[in-house]
Amino acid sequence: MGILQSAYAAPLAIAIFIVTLILVIWQPRGLGIGFSAIAGAIFALATGVVSWQDIPQVWGIVWNATFTLVALIIISLILDAAGFFRWLAMHLARWGLGRGGLLFSLVVLLGAAVTALLTNDGTVLIWTPTVMEMLLALGFSKEATLAFVIASGFIADATSLPFPVSNLVNIITADYFKISFLRYSLVMVPCTLVAIATSLGVLWFYFGRYIPKTYNISGLQLTSDRIIKDPLVFRYSFVVLGLLLLGYFFAEPLGAPVSFIAGLGALFMLALAGRWFHRKTARVINLKQVLREAPWQVILFSLGMYLVVTGLRNVGLTNGLSDRLQYLSHWGITQVAIGTGFLATLLASVMNNLPAVLINAIAIQDTDVTSPHIREAMIYANAIACDLGAKITPIGSLATLLWMDVLARKGIRISWVQYIRTSIILTLPVLFVTLLSLAIWLPWLIA
């Protein structure tokens, strides 16, 4: 009798998943998230929890999202090396007009814009350290700096809803349910605007007392020639970002995946930075370092973790979730959106949003829901929860784990208890209002 028919199948699949998740978080001896996830996948294959036939199916789900992320992070790293983000921070301090409250709002809004175009991971890895550097130059207190830093980390996930490319979760959702870039954006951009407005309100409520009323910009370098390291790359930065966004909308009619558009953008930036076609000026950016820092392990992580999650499906552990969603489907669209969202939030907070979004997607696919309105509400509520609701715990999203690592390397350590206590207060109201906006907007869009 095979492992899938044995009484030990479900406990074994759960045990493999838990151990894999522990390895991904712990990363013993610098194993990295990729090799940790692959170790779990190998054990799942060896025990028969997943089969070799599952590998091409899983790869078909994750490859587009994975390569899109890698390409966008490469673009982000090149922009950072060119001085693009420091230039933005410099102008942000100037636009703040010496008023702490205005600067706080601008940091949140610009963080949302960076996330929309360059993923939540790009915001965490690059924008957060840049904000910290700016605050240090402005002489902000430790409490004020922490307020800005937590706001930047929160907004990286809370506003990663608008486009499929803004979060790995979104691309996987769009690919799994075959949602076009335009359709996804039409649904999620209005919800993102609600999430931004609500996030600003909640962040102000929680951190307002720590934000200084005024600040002095004299300590900040305000000359562009000292900030911009590679003028050639900088000159094309806004053009490339604009063309990227346009390319995403035209990709599907042309039959091209979004990873192809992102890859072209990354290749163009590499060509600019490497002076492949512009040899009159000297190369400034170290491309070897950029390529070393690119998240190549995410490729292994995506394949390995999703194979482990497929093991949970193979032993029938997604059936119970499908039953809960089937029960919710008999209620109105508001109850469905909020119920699905909070159910997905619970899973993402416990098991990380990347496996959670696939488990929920499988469960939604397996439900017998006849109403397209209800089905769409489930799909988008799942994405919102796995983007935003996953902020509740440090293991909820890869971006949060990266964010905490960035802070630790900068000398700022936040305990899990402190993080969860703060994040619950920040996340739950924003999540509820955003899911409610989905329930209100979606019927209008469908009509």
Image (spheres, rainbow, N blue to C red):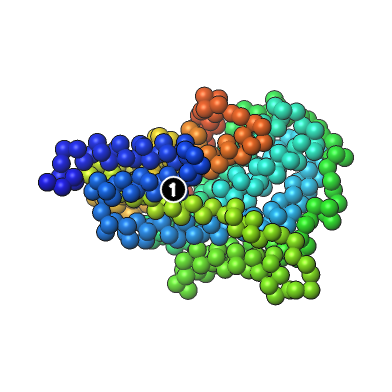
On screen, residue 292 above or below 421? below
Packing grade of label 1 (10 A; few <14, some 14-19, many >=20) is: many
Callout 1 secondary element: helix
**443 left or right of 238 in image:** left
What's the residue at 55%, 26% (across, down)?
415
Q: Report whether residue 39 is seen.
A: yes
- Determine the image quadrant of residue 78: bottom right
Where residue 4 appears, as percent x and y from the top left, is 19, 46
Where residue 225 appears, as percent x and y from the top left, is 84, 56
**341 left or right of 83 in image:** left
On screen, residue 238 above or below 392? below
What's the residue at 69%, 59% (across, down)?
286
- Determine the image quadrant of residue 154: top right
- Residue closest to the far front: 29
Q: Report whether residue 243 is seen.
A: no
Q: Nearer the viewer, residue 296 or 62?
A: 296
Where residue 433 appears, as percent x and y from the top left, is 50, 38
What's the residue at 51%, 55% (across, down)?
296
**Quadrant that contains the C terminus:** bottom left
- Residue closest to the far left: 1
Where residue 97 appears, as percent x and y from the top left, is 82, 41
What's the residue at 80%, 37% (across, down)?
138
**409 left or right of 2 in image:** right
Q: Nearer the viewer, residue 249 or 127?
A: 127
Number of residue marks: 1
Which residue position is annotated with label 1? 35
Q: Amino acid at mark 1?
A: Phe
On screen, residue 344 above or below 84? above
On screen, residue 189 above or below 419? below
